[in-house]
Amino acid sequence: MMKKTDFLVIGSGIAGLSYALRAAAVGTVTIVTKKKIQKSNTALAQGGVAAVFGEMDSFDLHTQDTLGAGDGLCKEEVVKMVVENGPKRIMELAGQGARFNMDGQGEYDFALGREGGHSAKRIVFAQDLTGKEIEDTLVAKVENNENITILEDHIAVNLISFSSSVRNGLVVTQHEDICCGAYVLNNKTGKIETFYSGITLLATGGASKVYLYTSNPDIATGDGIAMAYRAGASVANMEFVQFHPTCLFHPEAKNFLISEAVRGEGALLIDENGNRFMDEYSKDGELACRDVVARAIDNELKKTGAASVFLDISHRDEAFIKQRFPNIYARCMEYGIDMTKDPIPVVPAAHYMCGGVATDLNGKTDIKRLYAVGEAACTGLHGANRLASNSLLEALVYSHNAYKSSLEEFKTIGSKIDMELDPWDETNTQDSDEAIVVSHNWDEIRRLMWNYVGIVRSDKRLQRAKRRIENIQQEINEYYWDFTVTADLIELRNLATVAELIIQSALMRKESRGLHYNIEYPDRDDVNWLKHTILKKAY
């Protein structure tokens, strides 16, 4: 049976929930989320949201910092639009109940932190749990809205294009650039349901789980990017993967991030002998942009053979550390590390996708009625490297813009809301008895991406990765056609697609810029490569 909704939101982070709350004022909204609604990258964000509130700050300064971090590839009109609209969106969020740290008695006298790449204090934060505070605020609003249906433990399989014949979510006839819904696996029943929607919004987050070591949760498998690409949307700048310089290095910690804000409050990076090293790599030292710091740490580890470097904030007052970073302090203590006295062992890990589904200033993709916001999108804000804490800002601003634009598009749909879509076709498929295929390929993809397509790259490594991913893709596609679709298989298929896109994009760019560093082309080349890398599926 086909289900209908005015607005289909795939993803439940800050971008998807903000959009859903706006759209619910004019129509029915269905939110599809893979796990529980609070499970998202947003909830893990520690540092904060970058925006101009300080007396010593300005829109121009924030714009210049963003452009500088983006290493020539930011779209200036996008940067200015996001920066200038950011404070309004944060004030709205505070008005919805988000409790940010304050530095005065005024309604918007926010306490402001500083992070790498910023020339002024402009990080609005809630202790070191900013993302959780924002997520909890939005979830409470969404759960109390009668126009919003939340489908937890559901995972989108593929987008549905208008008037296309499909088998298992793959377009097999002439593709048309109109999205009218998605096939969604109900993980509770194991059945795939057909959703018709007037507007579909991809807010599925990033894809850093494609790497062996990452700050991201297991859900970050690039689902929106992969689905949009398969449907015919353009994707852009997939070679620019941001590796956060400081993830906790401990065998039991898995993916715990040590926030950029710790360095912003004066923490120093030292080697195993207690020597600082960042001044050798940048005049900004520990407050250099993330691409610089991550490559510096990577180089130090390769040079010395050490397992990690260390982040030391023990020179700051003990009470201040505990008050400013209660979550990080508590987590480190779980592993026997007292950050008020001991340096924290850290290593870089895959953190944020600067590339994604290409959109305009309103989050529109090049497929009608399909929008992308948040980390799943490539808006042009981040360019070749994201400035710290600009991600939550982008999500807030673009969810607002996407709502305004999609509302106008929704008004033009009219009677098409009554169309019928083909149901999911499971003909000649059977339950799998070879789950090892999924787990083995998942592990192989993540290892090859870390080893061959990581912080420092070469054409030789990239070509090796390309050959390997082609073989893996073939195996996954054969498996996909023969067996009943499961959540694990959907994620593996998406992970492989994203890996292929990153490799293709990295091979195309014959220079080093921002987050993409190729030892065979160590210099930035503005003559040939001051442009975006665009990939679009051929039919």
Image (cartoon, grey):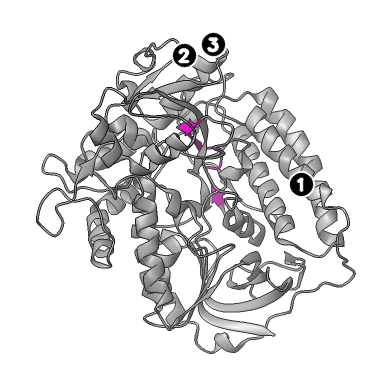
Disc 1: CA contacts within 10 A as few (<14), some (14-19) or many (>=20): few
Task: Find residue 177 and report its horizontal and vertical position in percent.
Answer: 60, 67
Q: Quadrant of the C terminus?
A: bottom right
Q: Which of disc 2 and disc 3 is earlier in sequence?
A: 2
**Mark seen at residue 303:** 3
- Give the foreground label among 3 and 2: 2
Distance from disc 1 to disc 3, alpha carbons, whole Å, reads 34 Å
Decide which of tag 2 and tag 1 comes sooner along the chain: 2
List x then y, in percent, for residue 240: 51, 37
Depth check: 373 or 206 in front? Answer: 206
Magenta-drawn segment? 235-248
Q: Secondary structure at mark 1?
A: helix
Type of amino acid under label 2: Glu
Q: Gap in Å between the C-alphas at discs 2 and 1? A: 36 Å
Amino acid beneath label 1: Ser
Please name which of the two marks, 2 or 1, marks the residue nearer to the observer. 2
Determine if the magenta segment contains residue 242: yes
Q: Are marks 3 and 2 in contact (CB under 8 Å)?
A: no
Q: Which element carries disc 2, helix, strand or loop? A: loop
Identify the mark at residue 439; answer none if there is no mark. Answer: 1
Q: Nearer the viewer, residue 176 or 439?
A: 439
Residue 494, disc: none
Picture quarter containing residue 325?
Answer: top left
Q: Amino acid at mark 3?
A: Lys
Q: Nearer the viewer, residue 216 or 55?
A: 216
